[in-house]
Amino acid sequence: MAETYTIDELGAAKAEAEQLTTRILDLRDAYYGEDAAVASDEEYDAMMHRLEELERLFPELQSQDSPTQTVGAARASLFDPVEHAEPMLSLDNVFSIDEFDAWATKVERDSGRRVDYLCELKIDGLAINLRYENGVLVSAATRGDGVVGENVTENIAFVHGIPQRLEGEGHPPLVEVRGEVFIPVKAFEELNAEQVALGDRIFANARNAAAGSLRQKAEGKNADKRAQMKNRLAKLRMLVHGIGAWPNPPVESQSEVYGLLKVWGLPTSPYFQVVPTKEDAAAFIETSGKNRHTFEHEIDGIVIKVDELELHGELGATSRAPRWAIAYKYPPEQVNTRLLDIVVSVGRTGRATPFAIMEPVRVAGSVVRQATLHNQDVVKAKGVLIGDTVVLRKAGDVIPEVLGPVVELRDGSEREFVMPTHCPECGTLLAPAKEGDIDLRCPNARSCPAQVRGRVEHIGSRGALDIEVLGEVTAAALTQPLVPATPPLETEAALFDLTVEELFGIRVIVRDNETGEVKLVEAAPNADGTPGESTPKEVAPFQRLRRTSGKTPDPAYDPEAEEFAGDARYVPSKAAHDLILNLGKAKTSPLWRILVSLNIRHVGPVAARALANYFGSLDAIRAASRDELASVEGVGGIIADAVLDWFQVDWHVEIIDRWTTAGVQFTTPGHPGPGAAAEQGGPLAGLTVVATGSLEGFSREGALEAIIAAGGKAASSVSKKTDYVAAGPGAGSKLGKAEALGVRIIDAAQFALLLEGGPDAIAVASTDTSVAENDNESDS
DNA sequence: CACCCTCGAGTTCA
DNA sequence: CTCGAGGGTG
């Protein structure tokens, strides 16, 4: 039964409906955006009801773009299939500049005229199609198979920056806008941190995180879940880069399309560039590749498009991809490989660390077969099973990192990793050091072979006594309990009692990880019994083993049970003699180095220096009270406790006793005694300097020592408290950080001047501009 | 309490 | 060299 009404009534209703529509859409934008609610849900509902009522009373007012018909009206539910008005094609790929050049050459030939190229970043995200009717968002869908995608309208509404209604006037009745939904790198890291906090699985990469977030479904009405989901979606962003169905666009080029999209209030990328030649496009590919980690989002390549729209039509498309655009793909920095096993290693502190053993694979320039998994919680959080295909990358382009499993490739044969209850090396029951610790530790500090080996290696390391020859393999050789039955070093207490004769008896079994070949290596005197200079590099000191086999002795290998597959090799006596010689020299190392080599918890080079400066001898440290220890700058209650605890252990004291007997110096000669820590002036007094890269005239250690000797503080990382960064060739991220913080950067020559005469010596160079600096740098 | 710093561990390369 | 964890300082 039709209702009757006058023209005036209709006019008034129309005006009211338009007003309501505007307010409702505004509210919707605000609601889905980050603003707090501008109106209450009740007010919103009331407006919707009133609008529905008006549309019922005046059917003329109904239109496709009314809010009652669009988002939120549950026209299509989440993940329902949506057919794109225009198919979403994919792009053909090229993987080298040569291939790109070939593509561009063909395009230019087929075009028959000059071609401008539009270059843009290829965002690693999800392709999404937004359908606007008369300027109002009516649906958002994933790419799907290109013809039919999944409806994600409900979720996309929470992604910031996607307008529910386009700005401006005179929008076409139908336009499809294509773009990429992604999660910015920063937000991705936050998200994974939150996932860990919630005990949920972390996302393997930004792309998965974006896809996972967009494909969430809020189950039921659980408010927490809904809030969490909204929070995740709010981290997503979208950038648009194209247009689907749109007959007769009012512009002539792709770049003008972007301009128009921007005017409409759609988010476009700030990074695109139109260039006149294919060489310029190649240059864009080159530079963007170098900077690929500096953008807010991950990129996996560059997209090059012919800018002129008319050419798009002329060049046409194949069934899969347009001929007027191409994707240049960067070599993957993430690869898939097989997780063969997860095994547990024990470090010098006894911490049991699971790590992944993988099918060797090349990633970002080197072959990787192992990566740490930190602890059992991380293994769980990453969700990897033994036998999985996993995603591997190099964090910071250096450290291999397992990101997560490729779940789709599982065949059911995978098994879960079970953290061992006992130490894999000595069989002692593993336990957390203190209540609530995630890390498990082997409490058998004195005798666990892994820990003794680790401590001995640490003693030889650069930060401690810096003993040449005493590296990973030597430490293992000296402590491995298999052949002979008792190792020369049961603990580090016997280190300085070693004799050349003892070393000659050492045989080491090394298993080559690549070939699986087992080798016996034995130290032996030269035929004439002399220390022998005859075989310096060829047959090698102990380090040579690292080169050829690369691996530590295999403690699980029983030499009696099997014949050796490889040759027995003899380590020349030179290495043995050198080791003894270097150990002898190390006995008079500075006190702080001796302290570091004692392996006291939390006492590294810095804390050790502080303690050594203040107390001057180990005896003084031993006699000090907790308060006195903690009064030293850089030492607090926890380190003080660690020092006190260390002296309580019998076999620790035995180390001191035996080292003392062997001639190790535990006293700084001429130190006036505790508390007299000299407030040494020096040209660098009160200044903090960081050295990075290779500084001509200084070794890494030398630069550090020089800073301290000049009375300055040698910091290991750049912060705003840093006064100078001395940077040479090969300086890495520290240089960038210094620039970002505005810290003064100096070169090797200026560094030398600074050490001599303090800040005044180079103050001239800084105020006087280029001339003075050129003088300093001219010889590089 | 925020910020900065050190410690400790793992990894690969020249 | 980088990261996470956790200590120290203002």
Image (cartoon, coloured by chain):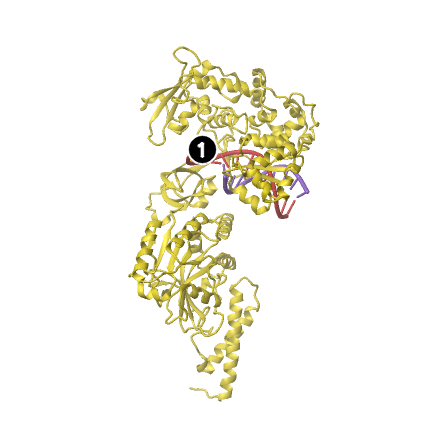
Chain colours: A yellow, B red, C purple
- Camera-side residue: A207 or A688? A688
Amino acid type of disc 1?
Ser
How far across and down, in percent of the image, does residue A213 sit? 45, 56
How far across and down, in percent of the image, does residue A666 sit? 61, 21
How far across and down, in percent of the image, does residue A524 sit? 40, 15
Residue A110 visible in the shown view: yes
How far across and down, in percent of the image, does residue A21 sit? 50, 75
| A397, above or below B9, in the image | below
Q: In this image, A379 relative to A680: left or right?
A: left
| A282, above or below A719, in the image | below
Task: Name the residue tied to disc 1.
Answer: A345
* Quadrant hosting residue A663: top right
Residue A716 visible in the shown view: no
For the N terminus of chain A, the image quarter is: bottom left
| A38, above or below A365, in the image | below
- Camera-side residue: A634 or A529? A529
Task: Tell which subunit mark 1 falls on.
Answer: A
Callout 1 environment at 10 Å: few (<14), some (14 to 19), or many (20+)? some
- Camera-side residue: A493 or A424? A493
Q: In this image, A684 relative to A96: left or right?
A: right
Residue ID at (51%, 82%): A13
